[in-house]
Image (cartoon, rainbow, N blue to C red):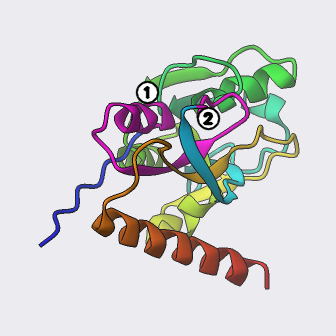
Amino acid sequence: RVSVHISSGPSNVLLAGLREGRLDFAVTLVSDGTDVSDLSSAFLQPSAPRVLCRRGHPLQGARRLAQLVDAEWINTRRFSRERTPGNRLADWFSDNGLAPPNVVASIESVFDTLTTVARTDYLFLAPSSVLEEGGVDLALESIQIVEAIPGANLCFVQRADVPLAPAAAEFARILKSYTSLLRRRRSY
């Protein structure tokens, strides 16, 4: 007798949903510049970001970020505050002395983004776990760039001042247990 509603979107959208009381918790990217001072945040796993492209993309063999300066990108939102998850792509280019990347579209839904990347020559910066999801690896590959991508961690975030309801707490326990199991499995 529990109704579950799952929302997806960039971290800023999910964190706003938490603060407004529309979400019980979020599993989202948190980086050094993410303001979670009023929230409770627990590490789940590193995001291990990768540049994703469709299979057979002409830039698939690129190894240096400078080789991607003319590429067209999709991001989950417009660039904003430095060192936040939604700004990692711009931070990466800036950290390497390059002009901002050419972002041709901003798509909040990761699933819509992946579908678009799989059917176009657009690139997308995403957690490597995206490639591990069923079926996605059949249409997408990663470009192995040597320059380090600014990090972020996948975290469990909830309001610090409001305890989870029993059903939400149990669902959260299952999610945390599952990510812990995946992390242990990957370390072997």
Query: Could you tell me which residue is drawn at 22 percent across and 62 percent down?
Result: 4
Give the mark nearer the N terminus: 2 vs 1.
Answer: 2
What is the x, y in percent for residue 72?
57, 28
Between marks 2 and 1 in the image, the one whose residue lies nearer the viewer: 2
Q: On the rendered image, what quadrant is the C terminus found in?
A: bottom right
Q: Quadrant of residue 92?
A: top right
Query: Position of 179 compared to 99: left or right?
Result: left
- Kind of element beneath mark 1: strand
Residue pointed to by mark 2: 85
In magenta, the rendered stretch is: 10-37
- Kind of element beneath mark 2: helix
Question: Is residue 28 within the magenta segment?
Answer: yes
In this rendering, the answer to whether 14 lies above or below 28 is: above
Question: Is residue 55 within the magenta segment?
Answer: no
Query: Could you tell me which residue is drawn at 43 percent across and 66 percent down?
Result: 172
Q: On the rendered image, what quadrant is the N terminus found in?
A: bottom left
Pick whichever, 75 or 178, lies toward us.
178
Which kind of residue does numbered mark 1 sit on? Ser
* Label drawn at residue 106: 1
Q: Residues within 10 Å of mark 2 (few under 14, many from 20)?
A: many
Q: Is residue 127 visible?
A: no
